[in-house]
């Protein structure tokens, strides 16, 4: 008989519960949970991914809803939009100094502290497992998967340089660890 505490439905329920418990509504903050997600997303995304469309995909919402969230965060002076260098029809968003200061007060810090207490080995396994689950769910639902360069099929290196085959471009060192909307999990992640 299977151990009831480790059934897939219990794990799924715990993931949802942890997500809700970590949300900002209970943290008495100035921003809504969606606004916090927006701020975090634009802080963690690479240059080609900091767009309203990519945020809509990441947030699993419509472009209209994503645009309203972005506008509300922009009105607060936490992000600023500029025309994309890659597609002049699109805007790319960056955090302002006020946005970075607000992010320092992120209610997710409590969850981060708990995860940090797990130790490096557990964190690495946990991250690998959650990444695998997120990628498999995205594949099952035929929606974009988000991840960082090192786990992506487009990622390559040549000497000291990192390269994105999807963008046909060399990667800046700080972009390698950032979220990308063009992410396709490598075979090791897909399993």
Image: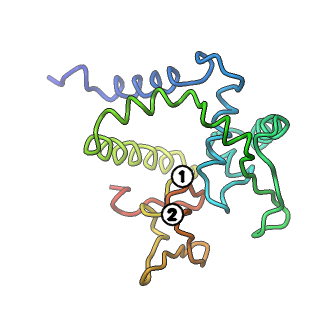
Q: What element carries label 2?
A: loop
Instruction: Pick whichever, 41 or 173, lies toward us.
Output: 173
Q: Position of residue 87 (x, y in %)?
A: 79, 67
Judge from the rendering whether residue 181 lies leftward or rightward of residue 4; answer left or right. Answer: right
**What residue appears at the point 62 percent right and 59 percent down from the top-left corner?**
46
- Assess whether mark 1 and mark 2 are in contact (beta carbons under 8 angstroms): no
Residue 178, above or below 102 = below
Residue beneath the point at 37% across and 33% down: 115
Quarter of the image for residue 103 reads top right
The disc, 2 or 1, on the residue closer to the chain's N-terminal end is: 1
Position of residue 147 relative to residue 87, above or below, is above
SS for dot 1: loop
Locate residue 132 relative to residue 93 in the image: left or right.
left
Comparing marks 2 and 1, which lies closer to the viewer?
A: 2
In-front residue for pair 47/97: 97
Give the residue pinned by disc 1: 146
Mark 2–mark 1 Cα distance, whole angstroms, equals 13 Å
Q: Is 100 rendered above or below residue 13?
A: below
Q: Position of residue 106 (x, y in %)?
A: 59, 31
Q: Residues within 10 Å of mark 1 (few under 14, many from 20)?
A: many
Which is nearer the eye, 156 or 12?
A: 156
Q: Where is residue 36 in the image (x, y as percent from the top left)?
A: 65, 33
Question: Quick one: quadrant of the C terminus?
Answer: bottom left
Seen as rendered, the residue at the extreme bottom is 159
Residue 137: x percent and y percent?
46, 44
Q: Mark 2 points at which residue?
A: 176
Label 2 Cα neighbours within 10 Å, binned few <14 / some 14-19 / many ≥20:
some
Q: Which quarter of the picture shows residue 3?
A: top left
């Amino acid at each position: 008989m299977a151990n009831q505490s480790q059934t897939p439905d219990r794990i799924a329920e715990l993931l949802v519960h942890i997500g809700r418990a970590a949300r900002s509504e209970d943290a008495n903050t100035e921003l809504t949970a969606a606004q916090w997600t927006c701020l975090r997303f634009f802080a963690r995304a690479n240059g080609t991914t900091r767009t309203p469309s990519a945020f809509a995909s990441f947030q699993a919402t419509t472009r209209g809803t994503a645009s309203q969230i972005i506008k509300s965060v922009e009105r607060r002076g936490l992000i600023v939009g500029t025309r994309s260098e890659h597609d002049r029809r699109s805007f790319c968003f960056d955090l302002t100094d006020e946005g970075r200061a607000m992010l320092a007060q992120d209610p997710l810090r409590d969850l981060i502290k708990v995860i940090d207490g797990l130790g490096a080995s557990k964190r690495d396994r946990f991250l690998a497992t959650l990444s695998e689950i997120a990628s498999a769910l995205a594949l099952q639902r035929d929606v974009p998967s988000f991840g960082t360069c090192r786990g992506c099929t487009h990622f390559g290196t040549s000497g000291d340089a990192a390269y994105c085959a999807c963008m046909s471009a060399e990667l800046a060192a700080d972009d390698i660890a950032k979220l990308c909307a063009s992410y396709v999990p490598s075979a090791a992640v897909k399993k």
